[in-house]
Image (cartoon, rainbow, N blue to C red):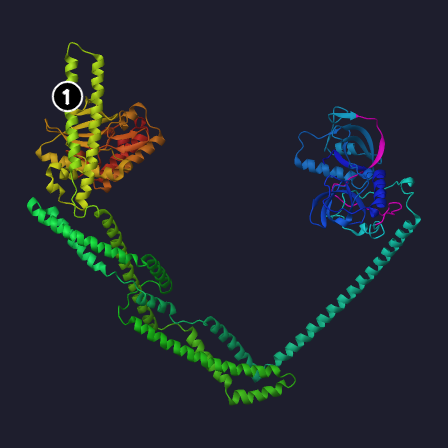
Amino acid sequence: NDDSSHHSIRNNEVLKLSCELAEVCPQGTSVFGNPDLTKIYAGCFSEDNCWYRCKVQQVISDEKCRVLYIDYGNSEILSRSDIVEIPKNLQYPSIAKKCRLWGLQLPPNQDLNQFDQGRKFLCSLIFEKEIKIRHKATCQNGTVIAQAEYGKVDIGDEVVKKGFAEKCKSPINAINCNEKKTDVAQYQPLNAKFSPPTWENRPNPSVSRRLKGHFGDQIGTSTKNENHMGNYLPFAKGILKVCDSSMVSNISLAKIKEDQKLIEENEKLKKETEALKEENQILHLESKELQSEEKEASKKSFELLDKTLHTYVGTKMRSLTAKVEVLKEVRRANMNVHFGDDLSKAVKEVTERCLIAPPSLEKLEKIWAEYNLAQEMIRLCKNVNESEVLILRRNEVQQHVYTTVEEFILEVDELAISGRSTTLQELSGSLEAIYGQVSELDDSEEAFQQFFEWKRIKLEEFNRVRSTTNASLQILARWFSDIVKVEQTFYLFCISVRGSALSKDKTGEKLQAFYLLFMCNSTQEQDEADKEITLNAYDKVIQRIRQEQHLITVVQSKYLASVEFKKQIVEWLNKSPSIDNLLSIKKILKNLKARLRWKLVEKNNLEESDDYSEHEITRIKEEITGLRNSLIQEIYNEQEEYERLTSLVQKWFPELPLLHPEAGILTYMNSGGLLTVSLERDLLDAEPMKELSTKRPLVCSEVQELKVLLKGYSVDVNTEAKVIERAAKYHRVWSEFKEKSGLLQLMFLFLCKSDPLAYLMVPYYPGASLGALQASTPLTLEESLKVMKGVARGLHTLHKANIVHGSLHTNNVFAVNREQGIVGDFDFTKSAAQRASMNSMVVRSLNLTSPEIRMGQLASPSSDMYAYGCLLFWVCYDMPRKQGVENTV
């Protein structure tokens, strides 16, 4: 167990138990049915045929059980006939005792290696030895505290000397141990390696093997392998010294004589076995000698045969045999010779199975072009009366388009377009892997015919050569068969064959000639003419594949467009959309604005009156706020209706702006949905923000609990259209990507009726500009990188839409929530060049104007990126602490 404990068995106990089992077990009853796993039986150990107490661990089958020998600790699988019942007086617990050396304990700092060495050292002291045990005490768990001696050697002292254990400070080395009177007894220690018990020197081994009439085999265990772990009992091989005469008094003299007789028979059999082994070795040596002689004779025979083959016939045979072997390999490799079979299949695929365009495709293209022309004429028409004729014509063509589309969809549904596209793709890939890229040698229409004619000639020639070669090979096979039959008259037969087969029929020469011809046809590379024929056919096949793939692409595109057309136009056949919903919304907006103005007047009157009521003022303010929110919501509804009408105008009804000029559809479309005529400056509760701008009117308001800024731009008749155009272009870019654009949202653009001003409504992020943040609570490096990444995305979005910002600085770059960077808008009354020339922003002595603009060049995306680079440098590095920054940059 460790370097201070072991298991031991008393010699007299184990001897007594063995004798009792030897007498009882041969007459015992075998176990049948389901054995009791808690009951103690006796099992016949397979290695020494002796009986030992055991318990059944597992029932393997109806005939086999796994048992555990409780007095030794090992297990094996036994037949039920080898497991018997034993009397109750033998059914007591295991007789092995766990012992611990007196006065010893393990060192507290001992590692696993030292523990293993200590255990091995203790095993070497007690293994297979008869030791004396002085019983000192017994622990509650049954462990015996004892002093062990082997002769005059104290085992505990030896363990302490080697440093594997140390003396206890207390005389009792275990807790909860009860000290007993010291006695001396002989214990046989259990072997930790589970070696089997030996019974050679056991007095009167008269126990007999059940069903065989004897017990044990005294010499059997001496020949066993001591390192075998499978079926050996874990009992030490020490010699048992004592056997009480009273315990064996019942063993009869006849049994002793019978055992003695068995011992003599075993000795005799052992001698006979040794004699047979010696005889076997002699026969093995004689067999080796005979094999060596046979190999020598065979070698001489082959040498003689080799000399004989130096004759004319032998030399010719070897030459022909070698060539036949080569010919065989070539024919095996060319067993399925095809001469462009893969190309032949491809030609048939693109000529016989090619996809034919649906009959209605051409008709659909013509009617669709006519429909687009009718729509364009309506779009360009400026006269309402003329438009009515055009609309009737368009509706008639639209009905024809719908009918043709239905016909086309039905025809395409019957075609296996997807599968055909996959087939062509795989065919093109396989051919390109064999023949390479298309060379475009000759676009002749006769390429396929030339290829099939060339293939026919090649196959005929190849089959002719193969047939003739087959005939010659059959003659040669018969010739070789005759030679094999010759045994004693080899030379005479060779002379005969030489005269008849080679001289008269000339078989060898014929075979050689056909061999050369077949090899030439099988292995030669194609000449230039052959290559040109195959490559022309290959190019033509690829051309047909590409044409068919283009047709499939066109058909699929037309099919998807037709399905979408049918799905959307079915609602508007012979019917025009109405703008009544838009007009209704405008009416609601007009009513809301009137109510809101009245409430504003009522609020002003109340505030100026003498009987001022705080409660009444609060009520009116809440009503005003509710009316403003309702007004904004209706404006959103108006925009949604405008979007629906805009979609109809762009797809199906371009006449709507002409027929309903009062709806303002064209104005909404030109502004990209940004311009609204339903919002007015005086309807909003605006607070001036002079600290943010001194160049233009800038007020702050609240719309649906959202802080917004109203930027005022001075406009006249000439600049109004430009402002709307630039703002609409910016708004379209933002609408495409929304929050992912990295740009500041433009909510509304409206014109002031009383003053020449255009107001732009944008979200308000108080204190979120880059300049304000860096002045109050600067961004960390990680936050700076996130923010500047968003700014870079915003510039990329603008540049992709061909928009140059021109005025990037710390006041129009925002860090929303200190992590989302967005680019603010710019002055839409000025061009990019004007904005860039006026951008004289300096950040910590760092001028954001690029060098090319200072030299008079126009603003460009690169000038925006220069300003961005300066901002990035300023944000990420502590610019105030740097010296000479301008020169460095």
Left or right: 577 as drawn, with respect to 27: left
Q: In the rendered image of this protein, does residue 805 appear above or below residue 337?
A: above
Give the secondary structure at mark 1: helix
Amino acid at pointer 1: Trp
Say if 715 sits above or below 604 in the image: below
Q: With 520 as the anchor, is 447 left or right in this view? A: left
In percent of the image, x 22 and y 12: which residue is there? Answer: 614
Where is residue 537? Give x, y as percent: 31, 69
Q: Is residue 222 visible?
A: yes
User: Badge 1 is on which residue?
Assistant: 598
The answer to whether residue 167 is magenta is: no
- Foreground residue, 581 or 180? 581
- Identity of the residue drawn at 26% across and 68% down: 443
The reply to whether the magenta stretch includes residue 184 is: yes
Residue 489 drawn at (x, y percent): 64, 86
Q: Give the range drawn in magenta.
A: 179-208
Label 1: few (<14), some (14–19) or many (≥20) C-alpha neighbours in 10 Å? few
Q: Which residue is drawn at 80% across and 52% down?
A: 223
Outermost residue, right direction? 253
Q: Where is residue 828 in the image (x, y as percent from the top left)?
A: 16, 34
Magenta stretch, main secondary structure, is loop
Depth check: 696 or 878 in front? Answer: 696
Along the viewing direction, whichever of 611 and 825 lies nearer the viewer: 611
Whether residue 359 sits left or right of residue 228 in the image: it is left
